[in-house]
Image (cartoon, rainbow, N blue to C red):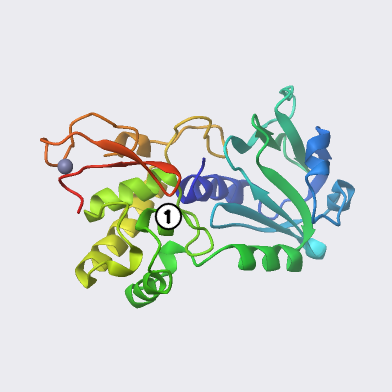
């Protein structure tokens, strides 16, 4: 699933190409998209002639705001892709929506093989209400005191589950939580509230550096992830534990990376380097 760095990369690519553009039309190609719009009040026709004012990321969600107060709330979930491609390229059966623009030969496509993602047509206040009720703060915006406070407030949760809980902290998923915990030297099953101040500091630092480095390398391409122009990311080459079960730890070089189910998810860690 695309996490914060992948979604940030997609957003950066779309922002530079689409902000300020006027929509020609938004078309839904598959009925499941309309059916999934439980909160939706707007039909795709509403977007005709509207200007894209801003595109940004919140957690793993993508938000478009348009002139006239309407917006789009998009989640890529497992296999969703949001990218620009030439309009003449025929959309395949996994392409569920397309948006065309005045004066642009390329169009925006929403493609999703497993159909867990969503693209909801909503008014902006509804989008902001939903995002604020479903998502905790952004990890890159937290200072150490805020981060420590947040750990204490949900202190009984295992740190792996804590990092994955979007309501506590937004944007981190299974890959980055493992990479962050390895770099911080903390075992994934430790309770969040029992970390020492030194560990909290290490965790905060690891979280920010992993996410920033991953953004710089345009994310990790594990399965279907591609950025706004269809390119793969490079952070998967920097993974130290994720999907390395049984292989020697790249830091201590004596233990093998272990895989255990923690918080209902496969977690990879080094039994020697992480305590
Ligand atoms: Zn190790």
Quadrant position of residue 58:
bottom right
Secondary structure of the residue carrying tag 1 is helix
| Residue drawn at (49%, 47%) of the image | 3
Question: Looking at the picture, how far across and down is residue 120, in whole percent?
Answer: 75, 50
Residue 6 visible = yes
Q: Is residue 134 above or below residue 225?
A: below
Count of number-bearing discs: 1
Question: Looking at the picture, how far across and down is residue 33, in whole percent?
Answer: 78, 40
Report which residue position mark 1 lands on. 161
Dot 1 beta carbon under 8 Å from ligand 1: no
Quadrant position of residue 145:
bottom left
In the picture, which quadrant includes the C terminus? bottom left
Question: Looking at the picture, how far across and down is residue 91, in whole percent?
Answer: 73, 25
Question: Could you say which is closer to the camera, residue 107 or residue 237?
Answer: 237
Residue 218 visible = no
Question: Looking at the picture, how far across and down is residue 270, in whole percent?
Answer: 21, 42
Is 263 displayed left or right of 114 in the figure? Answer: left
Is 21 displayed left or right of 235 in the figure? Answer: right
């Amino acid at each position: 699933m695309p996490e914060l760095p992948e979604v940030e990369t997609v957003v950066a690519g779309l922002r530079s190409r689409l902000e300020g553009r006027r929509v020609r039309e938004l078309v839904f190609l598959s009925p499941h998209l309309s059916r999934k719009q439980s909160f939706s009040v707007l039909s795709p026709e509403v977007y005709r002639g509207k200007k894209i004012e801003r595109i940004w990321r919140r957690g793993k969600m993508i938000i478009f705001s348009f002139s006239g107060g309407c917006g789009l709330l998009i989640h890529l979930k497992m296999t969703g892709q949001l990218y620009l491609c030439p309009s003449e390229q025929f959309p395949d059966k996994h392409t569920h929506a397309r948006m065309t623009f005045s004066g642009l030969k390329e169009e925006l496509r929403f493609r999703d093989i497993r159909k867990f993602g969503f693209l909801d047509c909503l008014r902006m206040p509804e989008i902001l209400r939903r995002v604020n009720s479903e998502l905790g703060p952004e990890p890159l915006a937290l200072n150490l005191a805020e981060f420590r406070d947040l750990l204490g407030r949900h202190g009984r949760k295992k740190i792996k589950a804590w990092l994955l809980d979007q309501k506590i902290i937004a944007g981190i998923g299974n890959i980055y939580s493992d990479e962050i915990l390895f770099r911080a030297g903390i075992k994934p099953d430790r309770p969040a509230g029992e970390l020492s101040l030194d560990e909290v500091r290490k965790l905060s630092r690891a979280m920010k550096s992993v996410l920033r480095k991953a953004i710089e390398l345009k994310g990790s391409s594990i399965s279907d992830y591609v950025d706004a122009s269809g390119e793969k990311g490079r952070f998967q080459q920097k993974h130290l534990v994720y999907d390395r079960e049984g292989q020697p730890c790249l830091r201590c070089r004596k233990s093998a990376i272990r895989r255990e189910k923690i918080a209902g998810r496969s977690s990879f860690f080094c039994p020697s380097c992480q305590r």
